[in-house]
Amino acid sequence: MWKKLKAWVRPPRQLKITGPGRIYLLITMGVGLGALNTGNNLLYLVLGMLLSLIVASGVLSERCLQQLVLKRVLPDGVFAKEPFALRYEIRRKSGRAFALSVGEAESALVGEAWVPIVESDKARVVRATSTAPKRGPLTLTGIKVTTLYPFGLFAKSRVFDVTDVLLVYPRRGFVCSNPAEDHTAQPGDGGNPRRRDGTGDLLGLRPLADGEDARHIHWRKSAAAGELLRTEREREERRQFMLTVDGALEGDALDRRCEEAAAQTQRLLSFGHEVGLKAGSRRLRASAGPGQERRLLTALAWVGFESAPQERKTR
């Protein structure tokens, strides 16, 4: 109900006078006063020209804000208090629009994207460097488009109702200590002390496959064999850790604990260990790899926001 009332009360356009626009209006008022006091026809002619430019500015800027279609291109996940790329897809049904700036309306995100020109039926994707203040799901309700066209005297804005949910991961930081090791065996897991993707003793050589890291190439042996060979080194068996987040925490204390857990997650996974999570009623089994890191960060972002809608909405 509040959203409908707010949308009904909100004016269809917002107008802001720029610095050059203030000077222009002062000049127009001065010419108008001079024309009234002197009755000089030339001053009336100049006043009419100045007023006609204001009318033309309003008409042309309004044409730029009509027939626009906008859509957000959200990243999969961003980190709190770190700059990230928020992209917008913008196109026009017919005609052209000039000198547009695109940003979020009534949102904690800051940052705008500049669009010099938008042509009909040609979608453009522009990028804005934005920053989210805190972790959790962030609901974005509207996209604000502003134009200075044609003379830069007025900044006219229009808000397009486009709703999305952006998931913000906890802020990345540093952690000095690791949590206690979890010695509980995972169902179906088997130890293998000679995994062949570590940094220990050399186990052998094999041809380099597509997409593998070139830092593992053994250049001397590759030169002798006439093909690229990569090293295979022994890696110690993975250790398991279970991170916990107390569900009774709230506010800043909960955010600090989630940030600490996120830092521990990245540290342990970078060493090849397996990491799991217990956060309230949510539990993730210990695992390793980039996919596990994304699952853990997503779970930490949702801690304390379980009642919020967990789906992306676009209108």
Image (cartoon, helix red, strand yellow):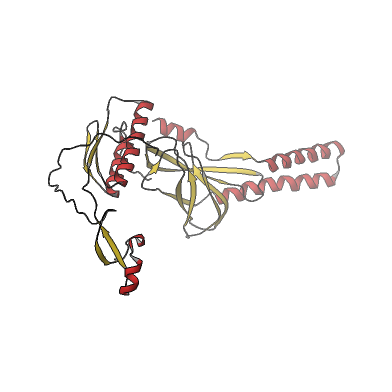
Q: Quadrant of residue 182?
A: top left
Query: For this view, does 113 lie left or right of residue 205?
Result: right
Q: Is residue 258 visible?
A: yes
Kindly identify the residue that appears in the image at 42 percent across and 39 percent down.
Answer: 141
Q: Position of residue 195 (x, y in %)?
A: 21, 54
The front one of 101 and 46 is 101
Classify the position of the N terminus by image quarter. top left
Query: For this view, does 228 lie left or right of residue 101?
Result: left
Q: Quadrant of residue 32?
A: top right
Name above or below for residue 120 compared with residue 102. below
Query: For this view, does 102 lie left or right of residue 173?
Result: right
Name above or below for residue 47 compared with residue 120. above
Kindly identify the residue that appears in the image at 48 percent across and 39 percent down.
Answer: 105
Q: Position of residue 150 (x, y in %)?
A: 64, 51
Could you tell me how many numbered marks the image carries? 0
Q: Position of residue 269 (x, y in %)?
A: 29, 45
